[in-house]
Image (cartoon, rainbow, N blue to C red):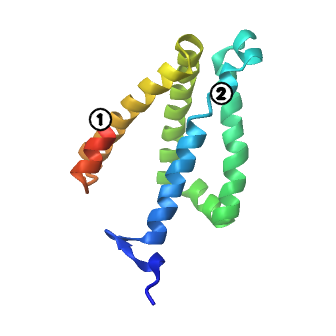
């Protein structure tokens, strides 16, 4: 009898493909809802500076990512990441860009609203990410149809 989880989709097994798809759906759901606390009445009317909101959001990321990394990858993963220079530099650069973009996103959400801010963010992020992946890192385009659908 044929095991459906062993079937191949390109170079990936069906199980790997479904796991990736599930991860994308969860990431989209969580990413699309992170701004809701920012628009809640107490935070929106308190006059709290956006830098404090970004600080609290960054602390929340630290409080969740370290335990999750330890659970999913073990303490060796954290030790290797802390003492590997390339990983440390990439992580620091990525986090600096993330904090700045998060701070600017808070300002956008407060002034323009969640809907228009996310619409602009997602469109621009798709094009910028595609350009980085394709032109800088040489990521291949495996499907022109899917790429065209994603960028339009």
Kindly identify which numbered label has been placed on residue 92: none
**Of 129 and 29, the residue lying toward us:** 29
* Residue 34: image location, x then y, percent: 62, 33
How far apart marks 1 and 2 lie (CA) works out to 26 Å
Marks 1 and 2: CB-CB under 8 Å? no
* Left/right of residue 88 with respect to residue 44 in the rendered view: left
15 shown above or below 79: below
Q: Count neighbours of disc 2 (C-alpha within 10 A) and say few if under 14, some if 14 to 19, many if 20 or more.
A: few
Residue occupying image coordinates x 22% and y 50%: 144
**Quadrant (top left, top right, bottom left, bottom right) of the C terminus:** top left
Q: Earlier in the sequence, mark 1 or mark 2?
A: 2
**Of 122 and 91, the residue lying toward us:** 122
Find the residue positioned furthest to the bottom: 1
Q: In which quarter of the image is residue 119?
A: top left
* Left/right of residue 6 with respect to residue 76 in the rendered view: left
51 shown above or below 19: above
Q: Is mark 1 on a helix, strand or loop?
A: loop
Q: Quadrant of residue 10?
A: bottom left
Residue occupying image coordinates x 58% and y 21%: 106
Q: Say which residue label 1 marks.
A: 152
Q: Say which residue label 2 marks.
A: 36
* Left/right of residue 21 with respect to residue 7 in the rendered view: right
* Residue 52: image location, x then y, percent: 69, 21
Count of numbered circles in the view: 2
* Residue 9: image location, x then y, percent: 35, 69
Q: What element carries label 2?
A: helix
Q: Count neighbours of disc 1 (C-alpha within 10 A) and say few if under 14, some if 14 to 19, many if 20 or more.
A: few
* Residue 146: image location, x then y, percent: 29, 49
Residue occupying image coordinates x 65% and y 57%: 69
Residue occupying image coordinates x 67% and y 14%: 49
**Quadrant (top left, top right, bottom left, bottom right) of the N terminus:** bottom left
């Amino acid at each position: 009898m044929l095991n459906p989880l062993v079937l191949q989709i390109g170079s990936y097994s069906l199980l790997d493909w479904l796991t990736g798809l599930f991860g994308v759906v969860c990431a989209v759901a969580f990413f699309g809802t992170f701004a809701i606390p920012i628009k809640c009445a107490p935070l929106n009317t308190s006059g709290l500076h956006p830098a404090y909101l970004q600080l609290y959001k960054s602390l929340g990321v630290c409080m969740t990512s370290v335990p999750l990394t330890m659970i999913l990858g073990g303490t060796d993963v954290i030790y290797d990441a802390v003492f590997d220079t390339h990983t440390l530099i990439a992580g620091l650069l990525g986090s600096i860009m993330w904090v700045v973009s998060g701070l600017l996103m808070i300002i956008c959400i407060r002034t323009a609203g969640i809907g228009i801010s996310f619409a602009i963010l997602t469109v621009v992020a798709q094009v910028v990410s595609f350009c980085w992946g394709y032109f800088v890192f040489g990521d291949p385009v495996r499907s022109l149809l899917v790429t065209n659908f994603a960028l339009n």
